Amino acid sequence: MTHRYLQSVRAALLILALALALACAVAASSAGAAPAVKKTPVKATFVGDSVSASITYVTSAQAQLERGIDVRLDLKVCRRLVQPSCPYQGSAPSTALQAVQSYGQSLGHVLIVKVGYNESSSGYGKGIDEIMRAAIAQGATGVVWVTLREKSDIYHWTNVAIRQATKRWPQLVVADWNAYSAGKPWFGPDGLHLTPTGAVGLATFLRPYILRAADTRA
């Protein structure tokens, strides 16, 4: 009986020793492992005109766009791309180019542009190039350019210029709002400006494009 008892004790001690050795090995491995790197949130700047500005008036739309993304909203009535903006209530806002340039290195990883309803399509492609040069020089790794609703031929040709610009700028991601919003009951009488539901729709639409444009960030 005593011999069997001693064998049981030895077996128990052996199991305990093995368990302690395993625990020590796991602890050593954990201590030596490199700490996980937490990716910083995407930082973005949204430069737009009155169509986009509805996001700032609709709390749920702004919250949707800002979910997990640090977004600065610079959305002004009557804004134009590079030509002087049209006046509204006695003053004209900065152009999209001026807005982009004003932020310098604080522009962020991604620039979103939704401008073009207040101007001709003529020269729009050159304006895109100016915006792209400024954004990249200021540290942006991607630019999301939103197409216009084609309620006139002018907007159609503006969209053509946007799509053609991807051949010159690999950093440019086209977000085809014209196609996505077709048939949606999200608009006022002009078919351009958004209802509150439309503002949420635009914010929801833009999120994956912002994240995609940020994929190349350091």
Image: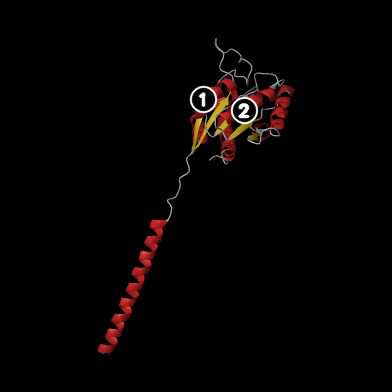
Residue closer to the observer: 104 or 196? 104
Query: Amino acid under label 2?
Result: Arg
Which callout, 2 or 1, points to the residue nearer the camera? Answer: 2
Q: On the image, numbered disc 2 is attached to which residue?
A: 133
Depicted 133 relative to depicted 7: above or below: above
Q: How crowded is the residue under tag 1: few (<14 C-alpha within 10 Å), some, or many (20+)?
A: few
Q: Residue furthest left?
A: 2
161 left or right, relative to 46 = right
Residue found farthest to the top: 90
Left or right side of 191 for 88: left
User: From where the camera sits, is residue 145 visible?
Assistant: yes
Residue to which mark 1 is pinned = 103
Q: Nearer the viewer, residue 146 or 140?
A: 140
Residue 12 lies, in percent from the top left, at 31, 78
Answer with mark 2 or mark 1, whichever residue precedes in sequence.
Answer: 1
Q: Residues within 10 Å of mark 2 (few under 14, many from 20)?
A: few
Q: Which percent across, then down, holds residue 143? A: 60, 33
* Quarter where residue 14 is shown: bottom left
Q: Secondary structure at mark 2?
A: helix
Snapshot quadrant of residue 95: top right
> Disc 1 marks which amino acid?
Tyr
Q: CA distance from mark 2 to mark 1?
A: 14 Å
Vertical relation: 197 (above or below) 208: above
